[in-house]
Amino acid sequence: QWDLLDLLTEAAGHEPTFHLRMNTEVTGPLIENNKVTGVTYRTTEGGTGELRADLTVAADGRWSALRASVGLRPHQFPSPIDVWWFRMSKHAGDEPSGLRAHITDSEMGLTIDRGDNYQVAYLNRKNFDPVIRQEGLEAFRRRIANLFPTLADRTDEIRTLDDVKHLDVRVNRLRRWHVDGLLCIGDAAHAMSPIGGVGINLAVQDAVAAATLLAEPLRRKRISSADLAKVRRRRWLATALIQTGQRGLQRGLLGPLATGKRAGFPKIPMLLFQRIPALRYLPGYLVAIGPRPEHAPAFARRPSNLTENSTKPHTAEPRS
């Protein structure tokens, strides 16, 4: 996601009113007359301050501090799995693999070809992290070698279990995405399962929908709670459909695999995908496009002849 954030930063830097504050953490909302009017913040150097705005957008993830501070509480859905992420090197003789699933009778994982390395996901049952930590590094390396045979020769690249990042899988959704002056989008509004990697897609679509619906009220400086509610109404069905599909896969496939109630991938879906090739495009479409695609409105599209000299680009501070 850093590549995407760098892209957005570079593009936004062409806008004369854009400003990016790096190494800055929001500490809470400013509230006046029951309306959010901005945020308070602190910097890594110890400085503090306030930023005032007609609209504050909480895009601070599944553990959103802004969401909690205004009393918005998501409805939690059960998740039977967790994920452990790490990276391993890609060797010269490795074949390009894109996204590849690995399933044994008791374990499962994914490898994502990132060009010069593999991003690896190991999946197991919820609350399994203490077991991994207790078993130790060598036992985890053996698990990975068994699940990913083509990577068995490089498991020593997992130097310590600190290299293995535990993701506590959450699936939740706000019933209401806003309070007066503040709107939640992305994981702050709906935490997604990592199945399909669709969380970033939905977050970007939320942002495009919000810009489409709210640009004019913001321009008029008359943005209301009714305006903010339109974003949730526009994005709710797509979010609910994707989460329903993810929860179904967790209950019917990943959960039983992780707990040993099922061995291997179900045969019927495999046969259908083999015999009806067109079905293979459906998962890809749902992941990449989704049931409610969003498109940048005409007013937000730059002229094709925009050059670097037409506006002065923003220069971001170094990332910590």
Image: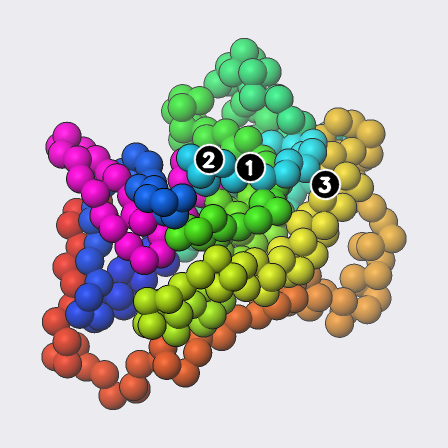
Q: Amino acid at mark 1?
A: Arg
- Please give the name of the residue rendered at 44% of the width and 75% of the height, measured from the top-left corner: 296
Along the polypeptide, which appears first: circle 2 or circle 1? 2
Tell me: residue 40, above or below residue 126. below
Residue tagged 2: 68
In the image, residue 56 lies at what x, y percent?
36, 52
Q: Nearer the viewer, residue 38 or 173?
A: 38
Q: Is residue 138 visible?
A: yes
Q: Where residue 250 is drawn, which disc sits there?
A: 3
Secondary structure beneath disc 1? loop
Say whether residue 57 is magenta: yes
Quadrant location of the C terminus in the rendered image: top left
In the image, residue 212 lies at what x, y percent?
45, 72
User: For the residues carrying marks 1 and 3, which lies nearer the camera in this image?
Assistant: 1
Residue tagged 1: 73
Left or right side of 286 for 295: left
Secondary structure beneath disc 2? helix
In the image, residue 33 lies at what x, y percent?
36, 45
